[in-house]
Amino acid sequence: MMEFNFAGCWALFVKEVKRFYSVVVQTVFAPVVSTLLYLLVFGQVIDTQIEVFSGLSYSQFLIPGLVMMAILQNAFSNTSSSLIQSKMHGNLTFALLSPISPLEFYLAFIGASVIRGLAVGVGILLIGILGFDLSVDSPAWVLLFAVLSAAMMGGLGMLAGILSDKYDQLAAFQNFIIMPLTFLSGVFYSIHALPEIWQTVSHFNPFFYMVDGFRYGFFAQSDVAASLSLWVTLAFLVLISAINLILLNKGVKIRK
Amino acid sequence: MSSAVRFEQVTKQYGEFEALKGISFDIEEGAFFGLLGPNGAGKSTLINAMSGLLVPSSGSIKVHGHDVIQDYRQARRLLGLVPQELISDPFFNIRQLLELQSGYFGIKGQQQKLWIDELLERLALSDKVDSITNELSGGMKRRVLIAMALVHKPQVLVLDEPTAGVDVDLRHTLWEFAKELHQKGHTIILTTHYLDEAEALCEKVAIMQRGEVKALDTTSELLSTHPFRYVRVAVEDGSGPLSESLQSRLVESDASGYLFKLEKELGMSDMLGMIHQSGIAVKDIRSRDASLEEVFMALTGAAQA
């Protein structure tokens, strides 16, 4: 029977959570504040001019998108920065010398990235609910999308962390892939407001489905069918997880 | 006696470069074993392959019969590595690091806390438990690495250049601790550039060069099979030039005299005859067997030539 080192996996998960919690101002509070600045600037300026979904203010439309954007970026940052720092400082060795399997290693890192993503997301969401009269149609759906999307981005962060040897390689991954995809995922607009060609292009952006599906949980309205968003998110999560597990099993760039 | 570690045809290829060329040997259970060789010989590559820090290109390594790839969990539970590079972690203090490492191995509870306390005390880290590794000196970091390697009480302890850059005090503490672990039945595998340490501590050594094992034997056997003994001759001022026979045996000279290497089959009377023939004004003569460093130089230097 396949052994699962639950205690080892849990210890690594706790370590990863404690790691970001030890710098909570940088890893949780700062992203909450910077995301709220978007809300302040875009929401206040555009609020009275645009109605994206019927019966909703622009700020109400914007908040779920901002929450998801923050979840995606922070889940990515957690795994990627932890891995690259561990590689640079050499302390990844400690985990590599232990009887933790690639799957346990993966689950521990992804679990921690989900926790950080949710911590930042909840911070923004609370302000949205309290300050902007935002209501949630289906909390379970919202939580499901938040967890799946954070896990997918945590996986993407791990992939970037594994493949990067230097901080600037990771920064390139973040600035040239993650940032454009998150900003062009419909966080600030409905893709129906875009010209047809850009609507088509948006359908190739996996982050669009995460934002759109997440938003569906709040308003029961979305640009594409919510079930499609769920399947796309799940498919990407499975794909990224599979790639990571193959790399971890082979020890690519980790067990040299 | 059964094997603590068994290497079978282990190779490691980096592109065209062959870092390990089919290494095969056994390290017996309970041995104090030295893995020696010049820089780039493949010692750390072999150790890292044994510890799971790299994947060998081919061959197998077993720790107490457990394959380090197929049965890596059990192999890693039996092995503790003190890596050569100093490692730091800016997020956790020493106690937290040791507790986390215990957690990776699934070990917790009061007994483990006591063991961690004992390790901290034995390695003179008790007053540093709340420090993060970035705040520590190189020697202190080395102590932390030793504690990390021992936290799961491994049967086999691998020390990769543990005394590089550490002060005499720590070196002494470390060797006393290593000897104590050895006496308790642990297998100790040591790589070091300080060959006097290896000679004093290791019962058996392997000398590696360019990814191959050049020699593998007990330390005493390696020393005794060396074809030379060494004769230091202290001379009076103003001694004349050396005869051809002495010149060919000269290892080094300084203001106080000469060091010659003498074939073991020759007796001291032959040496005295050569000295007499040269007309050297001798103050003192001392003869000794080869040191491990001289054996090492002869083996690795000959191969390089």
Image (spheres, coloured by chain):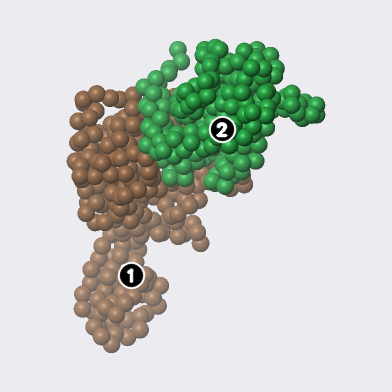
Chain colours: A green, B brown
Residue A80 percent coordinates (x, y)? 52, 36
Closer to viewer: mark 2 or mark 1: 2
Residue B18 percent coordinates (x, y)? 56, 46
Q: Name the residue under label 1.
A: B260
Image side of residue B9 versus residue B195, left or right: right
Identify the residue at image location x=28%, y=82%.
B280
Considering only vertical position in the picture, is B50 above or below B247? above
- The kind of residue tagged 2 is Leu
- Crowding near pointer 2: few (<14 within 10 Å), some, many (20+)? many
Residue A95 percent coordinates (x, y)? 41, 33
Residue nearer the viewer, A76 or B282: A76
In which quadrant will I find the N terminus of chain B? top left
Residue nearer the viewer, B215 or A170: A170
Picture quadrant of residue B91:
top left
Identify the residue at image location x=33%, y=66%.
B262
Image side of residue B74 versus residue B281, left or right: right
Considering only vertical position in the picture, is B31 above or below B296? above
Q: Mark 2 points at which residue?
A: A39
Q: Which chain carries label 1?
A: B
Identify the residue at image location x=36%, y=75%.
B246
Residue nearer the viewer, B118 or A83: A83
Question: Is circle 2 on the same chain as circle 1?
Answer: no
Disc 2 to disc 1, C-alpha distance: 85 Å
Image disc number at residue B278: none
Identify the residue at image location x=23%, y=72%.
B285
Picture quadrant of residue B90:
top left
Residue A27 percent coordinates (x, y)? 45, 36
Considering only vertical position in the picture, is B83 above or below B77? below
- The kind of residue tagged 1 is Phe
Report helix, strand or loop for mark 1.
Answer: strand
Is residue B211 visible to us here? yes
Q: How many labels were placed on the picture?
A: 2
